[in-house]
Image: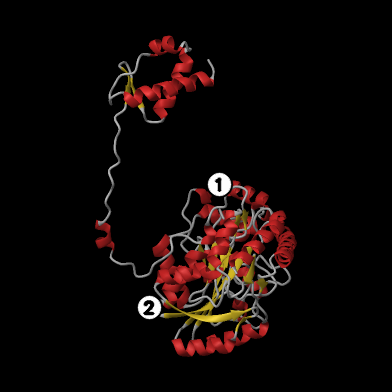
Amino acid sequence: MDNDSSSRIVSDLLDWIAEAPAGAKLPSTRALVTRYNASPVTVQKAIRTLTSRGLIESRPGVGTFVRAVRMARPLDYGWQTAALRAPQSRLPSSTTTMRSTPHGGVALHAGYPDRELLPERLIRSALARAARSDAALTRSPVPGLPELQSWFAGELAGATPVGITPPTASDVIVLPGSQSGLSSTFRALVTTGQPLLMESPTYWGAILAAAQAGVHVFPVPTGPTGPDPDEVARAFEESGARAFYAQPNYANPTGAQWSADTTRRILDIVQAHGAFLIEDDWANDFGITSTSVPVATQDDAGHVVYIRSLTKSVSPAIRIAAVVARGPARERILADRGAAAMYVSGVLQAAALDIVTQPGWQTHLRGLRQQLRARRDLLIDSVTEHAPLADLTAVPPGGLNLWLRLPDTADLDQLVRECERENVLIAPGTEWFPAEPSGPFIRLNYSGANPGAFPDAARVIGRALERAT
């Protein structure tokens, strides 16, 4: 008998089970074969189907019986409300950028590059070699593998001008991703309840880390070439802060890069206030029409605490980053990292080091620059043509994102919902403001999958924006 016969038996037995009491015994397989004029295989298939639905159960050597219907007992976790008390800060359980993309969707909301922009061959080879090395069986030092520390220090040293002492390997602490480095740095250098200056808009993960550390954020408005140094000076004076978190190169979400004059003036202000500049160089490898020039290369007095990530440029599966700090600041961050995670996976460190020291790494980065430029320009052209109400604040010289200002009357929530209904995911700009947004914005990532869909996605955004404005 075929599948239709099995389905017929299931349908008939469902009617019988509905009328039978719990524990009633089904006829034997032989009896069912005779009743339905079916083969034993077909009958057994029907029995398995009913068993998988939880309607019957087989007892070896006894028979098959109708299962008793068990009502789910509602569970009560109310006691935890009193035990946990009110949270000191309400942390979001998720963010728009981390949402999964439905099949066939256009992921303009995400924060990670598509796999075709990653050095896949280098990654697979490096992981295989790391798995065969001693790193797979031993604990790495708390600050990180010495060779990887040296690589991070050497990268900065190569960009440090004559007359400034570059960092050494002992100034480097390897991290399991830059997010943990932000949390540790805020806890160690700012401390709970103390003020922290932060660009606005800025990376949502830094806002989250600040809330988790319990520090008080003072927003500083920023533009295409960075924040106004006078505004930074005023914020230091009014807040009494001793730290300023910023992304001087290809800021997330705006793509802004500080000018040389802005860099010099802000570093002078930080030094004059005896403060720290916490420099997040997340997009060091994502230059398009310029190159990342870390502020840390201009400082050897320990004012700049430099965080460098490899996660997005190497692979999201290899969460490796580093913080470079000098003096007591480095010791405090190291103590926090040791308490939080003890050490970073030696296998991931060995793989990351293998990748970035291969000759193919530099070849990959040169090709990546061209691919990002093509994707960026395609998305800009698409939005300009099909969504003219969305104003590009500036063409980013690097990074992964476009930052678009919408009309003041735009309903941002409606826009996001309508785009999602047509399988286009976008990120509302509200998540990137540490205080009230200065207006309605959206962030579009041009490094995701299927750039060929950019024109159609821009049409969706344009139509939805007209309806939401």
Residue at the disc numbered 2 = 193
- The image's mark for residue 108 is none
Q: Is residue 8 above or below residue 107?
A: above
Residue 8: x %, y % from top left = 47, 21
Q: Mark 1 against mark 2, which lies toward the viewer?
A: 2
- Of residues 277 and 237, the one nearer the viewer is 237
Q: What colouring style does the render use?
A: secondary structure
Quarter holding residue 371: bottom right
Whole-Å distance between the Cαs marked 1 and 2?
A: 43 Å
Secondary structure beneath label 2: loop
Looking at the image, which is closer to me, 169 or 24? 24
Q: Could you say which disc has been placed on residue 131 in the image?
A: 1
* Left or right placement of residue 227 versus residue 241 in this view: right
Q: Contact (CB < 8 A) between labels 1 and 2? A: no
Residue at x 67% of width, y 79% of height:
161
- Quarter of the figure with residue 386: bottom right
- Measured as percent of width and height from the top left, residue 68 is found at 29, 30
- Image position of 79 (left or right of 440): left
The quadrant in which the C terminus is found is bottom right
Q: Residue at x 56, y 45 (%)?
A: 132
* Label 1 residue SS: helix
Q: Amino acid at mark 2?
A: Gly
Residue 93 in the image: x percent, y percent?
43, 60
